[in-house]
Amino acid sequence: MYGYIKGIITEVESSYIIIENNGIGYIIFVPNPYAYQIDSEYTIYTYTHIREDEYSLYGFKTKEEKDLFLKLISVKGLGPKMALPMLATGSISGILSAIDRENVLYLKKFPKIGDKVARQIILDLKGKLTSSSQVGVNVNQELLEALTALGYKQADIKKVVPNINNNDSIENQIKEALKLLLK
């Protein structure tokens, strides 16, 4: 219904923001509300979700984020309340890479995403989100996130990532990176 709303952030809560536009405050559920500053102007790309008992606005800082959200909610069994935390806790490139590489474990790390839903995401979206030229960049991003989560410093990670084969599975890439980091 709304393509985007441009206005001033008046309130930031744990799951939503309120953006004022022409004297109207819109409650918009966003992936990471604390990324917004009160009294600052933003353009929020929105998706209107209408059900018989609910009328909600979901918002995103970029069109790419919104596009991925729309693809995710098109998956059977995955609604807006499950897709939003995926964008909050994962990077766009990491999610795209996980889908393209069929990395069920990466997808299962998100809240409320079990084995069945993770496999359904891969089944419905694989090959529809990324081109093969983007995979190398995306896999490196996923590898960076995994190694950072394990407690390694960015400087150390950047030294070993160029030595990792992008065509390996993410699991093999992590194993190889760990071997190099332990040397």
Image (cartoon, rainbow, N blue to C red):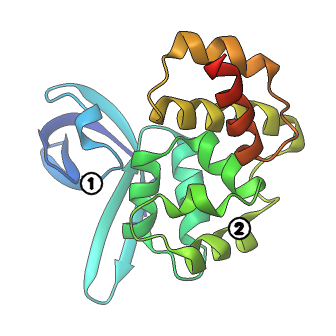
Between 108 and 26, the one lying in front of the other is: 108
x%, y% of residue 148?
49, 29
Precedes in sequence: disc 2 or disc 1: 1
* Residue 82 placement: quadrant: bottom left
| Residue at image mark 2 | 122
Q: Return the x and y of residue 34 as percentages of the image width and height.
A: 23, 36
Which of the two marks, 2 or 1, is nearer to us in this view? 2
Residue 134 against residue 58 in the figure, above or below: above
Q: Position of residue 88 (x, y in %)?
A: 39, 47
Element type where label 1 sits in the image: strand
Amino acid type of the residue tagged 2 in the rendering: Ile
- Residue at 84 percent across and 45 percent down: it is 131
| Secondary-structure class at tag 2 | helix
Depicted 2 relative to depicted 146: above or below: below
- Image position, residue 77 (x, y; %): 52, 82
Question: Residue tagged by mark 1?
Answer: 28
Apparent side of residue 124 relative to residue 26 in the rendered image (left or right): right
Residue occupying the point 55% across, 31% down:
147
Q: Where, quadrant-wise, is the N terminus in this rendering?
A: bottom left
The quadrant of the image that shows the C terminus is top right
